[in-house]
Image (cartoon, grey):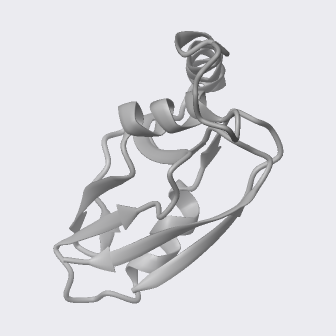
């Protein structure tokens, strides 16, 4: 297993970690896939377009609006972050093909921060 450490700078932020994940693939020469797991309840991980930065900005804007700051019961005041984490998910699999990530032409891997700024981790496990 490998760990990527991430620092977010905003409350809601998508951070492209594609290159950092790709660097780790060489540490798993026999792997056919890579499982990425976020061990946090107010963050997530997703794959989406990384060619046009407006897609990332549109997603961040959508996340800010989809779960408004309502009078939730959770005392910490970060229930929207917990809900967004549940909707996006905390794990995904990426195939490895000939030692490289098997992503589509326009795809990138994003760490999704919903309760930043914070220091976070993503676990990478070969499959």
Is residue 33 found left or right of 75 in the rendered image? left
The residue at the point 46 percent across, 39 percent down is: 85
Could you say where residue 50 lies in the image, as x and y percent from the top left? Answer: 53, 35
Towards the viewer: 64 or 82: 82
Above or below: residue 22 compared with residue 89 = below
In which quadrant of the rendered view does residue 30 lie?
A: bottom left
Q: How many marks?
A: 0
Q: Which is more toward the observer, 49 or 15?
A: 15
Residue 83 position (above or below residue 19):
above
Could you tell me residue 56's position as x and y percent?
A: 60, 26
Image quadrant in which the C terminus is located: bottom left
Direction from residue 98 to residue 68 in the image, left or right: right
Residue 67 visible in image? yes
Q: Is residue 107 visible?
A: no
Residue at the (53%, 79%) spot, across then down: 3
Asked which quadrant contains residue 31, the reply is: bottom left
Rendered residue at 66%/21% (across/down): 57
Residue 92: where, in percent of width, then height? Answer: 30, 53
Residue situated in front as seen by the camera: 17 or 45: 45
* Screen quadrant of the N terminus: bottom left
Residue 51 in the image, given as x and y percentages of width and height: 54, 31
Which one is nearer the viewer's eye here, 86 or 30? 86
Q: Quadrant of residue 63?
A: top right
Q: Is residue 26 left or right of residue 96?
A: right
């Amino acid at each position: 297993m490998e760990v990527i450490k991430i620092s977010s700078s905003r409350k809601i932020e998508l951070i492209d970690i594609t290159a950092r994940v790709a660097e780790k693939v060489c540490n798993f020469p026999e792997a056919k896939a890579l499982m990425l797991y976020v061990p946090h309840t107010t963050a997530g991980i997703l794959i989406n377009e990384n060619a046009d930065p407006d897609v990332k900005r549109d997603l961040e804007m959508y996340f800010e609006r989809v779960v408004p700051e309502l009078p939730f019961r959770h005392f910490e005041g970060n229930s929207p972050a917990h809900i967004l984490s549940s909707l996006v998910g905390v794990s995904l699999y990426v195939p490895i093909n000939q030692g490289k990530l098997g992503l589509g032409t326009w795809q990138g891997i994003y760490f999704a921060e919903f309760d930043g700024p914070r220091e976070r981790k993503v676990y990478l496990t070969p499959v």
